[in-house]
Structure formats: structure tokens, C-alpha cells
Image: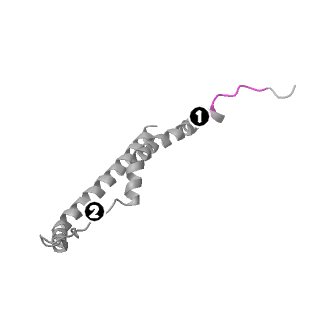
Amino acid sequence: MFGLLLSTMVLSGLLIWTKRTAIATATALKRSEKPARAKRAAAATLPLGEPGMSKAIAAQPPSRLRQFWLKWRFHINILLLLVPLGFMPKYFADAALFRGDVGLGEREIGEVQVGP
């Protein structure tokens, strides 16, 4: 039982760690691209006094994977906790069978008289 709970906790921790690593990597990449973006945005804008809108690059909407993750991450984490709980009855039944508490080794057979 403890092994299943520990495995679930490790998987949940790995999921959280992966997410945080991805966010940190994306932040680092944005920081390194920031000066280059600022130069491009400055070059794309119209000079002051001219009519019209700025041609600066618009922010991109989040990807479909990002939207899916934001919507379902709570439910996925709950499933990581509940799915192992569904397998626990079989785990306990198999453990009792291997210990000899149930099944063929459950009790000693008394003497059985055969014939007259």
C-alpha cells in the first residue's frame, strides 16, 4: 500500500517539476529574445506624427496544448491519485494469497477417512 502511495506521489511530483521546468525554460528564452524583439518592434513602428497604427508584433494566443493543460491539469492530478486506489483491492487480495492467509494455504486440512 505504501509503495502505491509513494509511486503516485512521485508521479505527481514529476508532473509538477516538468511543468515548472518548462515555464522556467520559456521564461529564460523570452528574456534572451527580449532585446531582439525590442529592436524589431522599434523598427516596425511608424514614426511619430504619421497617421496609422503601430505595426508591432501582436502577442500570440496560447497553443492548444497549453489551453488543454490549463483546463485539465487539476483533473489529471486527481486521476493520478485515484487510479492506484482502484487497483488496491486486487493488490491486497494478491498479497494475502502470497502470504497464505487465503487460498490453498489458508488452513490445515484435518484427517479425512477414506473407505471403511
Residue 101 percent across, percent down from the top left: 58, 31
Q: Which residues are magenta?
A: 105-112
Q: Tell which residue pokes out farthest to the right in this image.
A: 116
Q: Residues within 10 Å of mark 2 (few under 14, many from 20)?
A: few
Q: Quick check: 26 left or right of 82?
A: left
Q: Is residue 105 above or below residue 24?
A: above
Q: Which SS type dominates the magenta stretch?
A: loop
Along the line of sight, which residue is nearer the eye, 42 or 34?
42
Look at mark 2 in the image and give the residue it sits on.
59
Q: Quick check: 104 left or right of 82?
A: right
Q: Which of the 4 image quarters holds residue 32? A: bottom left
Residues at marks 1 and 2, CA–CA distance in whole angstroms:
65 Å
User: Mark 1 near mark 2, Cβ–Cβ under 8 Å?
Assistant: no
- Going from N to C along the chain, the mark reached first, 1 or 2, is 2
Q: Nearer the viewer, mark 1 or mark 2?
A: 2
Quarter occupied by the C terminus: top right
Q: Is residue 111 magenta?
A: yes
Q: Quick check: 78 left or right of 28?
A: right
Look at mark 1 in the image and give the residue it sits on.
100
Q: Tell which residue pokes out farthest to the left in this image.
A: 48
Q: Amino acid at mark 1?
A: Gly
Residue 87 percent across, percent down from the top left: 53, 41
